[in-house]
Image: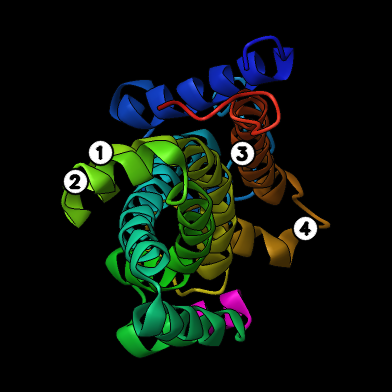
C-alpha cells in the first residue's frame, strides 16, 4: 500500500489533524469561544492568521477545536457501526436461513431511505447533540458493514480449512472467530477507512443544518453555516472550514485507496 505516494500524503494529513485536535489547547492562539464584535469578519492578518468570523472569534482556533468534533464523531461512529455490522454480518452469513433473511431485510429497509434524510429525522427526534449525532449515524452506518461481512463470510465458510475445522469438531463460535473473521478483516478495514470520510461529511452536514453540536461549539459544519450569509463580503469565513473538511475527506480516501490495493483479492490470497 505504501508504493502509492498518495497514501503517504493521506497519512500525513490524518496525523496532522489528529495532533491538531489533541493539542488544540496548546496550538490555538485564542479562546475559540471569545467574541470580538468590533473586529467581526476581519480578514486574515498577522494577529489572526485565518481571520475572524461573524462573531469576531478567531477562525484558526475554532478550526483546531472543530477538528475534535469531526474526528471524535467519525471514529466513534465507525467503531460502533463497524462492530455491530461485523457481528450481525458474521451471524447472518454463517448461519443463513431465517436469521439471514431477517437481518438482510432489515438492511434493505434501512437502505431504502436516503441516509442523510433519515439521519436528520433521527437527530430531530433525539435532539441536537453530539451524542445523538453519533447514535443516528451509527444506526445508519452498520448496514454497509453487515452486507460486506455477510458476502465475505459466504465466500470463506465453504473453504477447505473451515470445513476441516468443522470436521474436527470445532464449535461454531470458534470457527467464526478464529477461522473466518481474521480472513475477512482486510475488506472491513478498507470499508472502515472510507466510512470515516463519509461520516465527516455527514456530521458536517448535520452541524451545517444546526443539528450537530450545541450552538457556539466549534464545529466545521457550523462554521460553514455561519459564513453562508456573508459569503460575498467575507469568503474566508467559509473557505477555511470548507478546506479543512475537503482535506480530511481526501486524506482518508487516499489511505483507503492504499488499503484497497493492499487487500485486493486478486493480488493476495486468503491466509489459512
Where residue 13 appears, x then y in whole percent?
A: 57, 23
Task: Give the magenta-colored segment's residue range.
Answer: 114-119
Determine which of the numbered discs, if any, sits on residue 244 in the image.
3
Q: Could you tell me if the residues under marks 1 and 3 are in contact, i.e. CB atoms within 8 Å?
A: no
Instruction: Say few, some or many: other residues with alpha carbon within 10 Å of mark 3 (under 14 / 14 to 19 / 20 or more).
Output: some
Which residue lies under the disc numbered 4? 231
**Separation (CA) of disc 3 from disc 2:** 44 Å
- Horizontal side of 219 relative to 73 (left or right) equals right
| Label annotation for residue 174 | 2
Secondary structure mainly formed by the magenta segment: helix
Pick whichever, 201 or 56, lies toward us.
201
Q: Is residue 14 visible in this depiction of the protein?
A: yes
The picture quadrant where one finds residue 208 is bottom right
Is 205 inside the magenta-drawn segment?
no
Q: Which residue is mark 1?
A: 178
Per the model, the C-alpha gap separating discs 2 and 1 is 5 Å
Quarter of image, res 266: top right
Q: Dividing the picture into quarters, in which one does residue 85 lie?
A: bottom left
Work out whether mark 3 precedes mark 2 in sequence or the reverse, and give the earlier one: 2
Callout 4 secondary element: loop
Which is in the foreground here, disc 3 or disc 2?
A: 2
- Whole-angstrom CA distance, mark 3 to mark 4, is 17 Å
> How far from the left and from the top, in percent, is residue 198?
58, 54
Asked if residue 262 is positioned above or below residue 50 in the image, the reply reads above
Task: State which mark lies toward you, 1 or 4.
Answer: 1
Q: Earlier in the sequence, mark 1 or mark 4?
A: 1
Counting residues from the start of the chain, the first of labels 1 and 3 encountered is: 1
The quarter of the picture where the N terminus appears is: top right
Q: Is residue 230 left or right of residue 54?
A: right
Visual colour scheme: rainbow
The answer to whether the residue labelled 2 contacts the one labelled 1, judged by CB atoms less than 8 Å apart, is: yes
Which residue reaches farthest right?
A: 232
Amino acid at each position: 500500500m505504501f508504493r502509492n505516494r498518495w497514501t503517504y500524503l493521506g497519512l500525513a494529513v490524518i496525523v496532522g489533524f489528529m495532533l491538531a485536535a489533541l493539542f488544540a489547547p496548546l496550538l490555538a492562539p485564542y479562546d475559540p469561544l471569545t467574541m470580538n464584535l468590533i473586529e467581526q469578519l476581519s480578514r486574515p492578518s498577522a494577529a489572526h492568521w485565518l481571520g475572524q468570523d461573524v462573531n469576531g472569534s478567531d477562525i484558526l482556533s475554532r478550526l483546531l477545536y472543530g477538528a475534535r468534533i469531526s474526528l471524535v464523531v467519525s471514529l466513534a461512529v465507525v467503531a460502533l457501526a463497524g462492530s455491530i455490522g461485523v457481528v450481525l454480518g458474521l451471524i447472518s452469513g454463517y448461519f443463513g436461513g431465517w436469521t439471514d433473511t431477517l437481518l438482510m431485510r432489515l438492511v434493505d429497509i434501512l437502505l431504502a431511505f436516503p441516509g442523510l434524510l433519515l439521519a436528520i429525522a433521527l437527530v430531530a427526534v433525539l435532539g441536537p447533540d453530539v451524542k445523538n449525532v453519533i447514535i443516528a449515524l451509527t444506526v445508519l452506518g452498520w448496514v454497509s458493514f453487515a452486507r460486506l461481512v455477510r458476502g465475505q463470510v459466504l465466500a470463506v465458510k465453504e473453504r477447505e480449512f473451515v470445513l476441516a475445522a468443522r470436521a474436527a469438531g470445532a464449535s461454531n463460535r470458534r470457527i467464526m472467530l478464529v477461522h473466518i473473521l481474521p480472513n475477512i478483516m482486510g475488506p472491513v478495514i478498507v470499508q472502515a477507512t472510507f466510512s470515516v470520510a463519509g461520516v465527516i461529511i455527514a456530521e458536517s452536514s448535520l452541524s451545517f443544518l444546526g443539528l450537530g453540536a450545541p450552538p457556539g461549539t466549534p464545529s466545521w459544519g457550523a462554521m460553514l453555516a455561519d459564513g453562508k450569509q456573508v459569503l460575498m463580503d467575507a469568503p474566508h469565513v467559509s473557505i477555511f472550514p470548507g478546506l479543512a473538511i475537503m482535506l480530511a475527506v481526501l486524506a482518508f480516501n487516499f489511505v483507503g485507496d492504499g488499503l484497497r490495493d493492499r487487500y485486493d483479492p486478486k493480488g493476495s490470497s486468503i491466509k489459512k
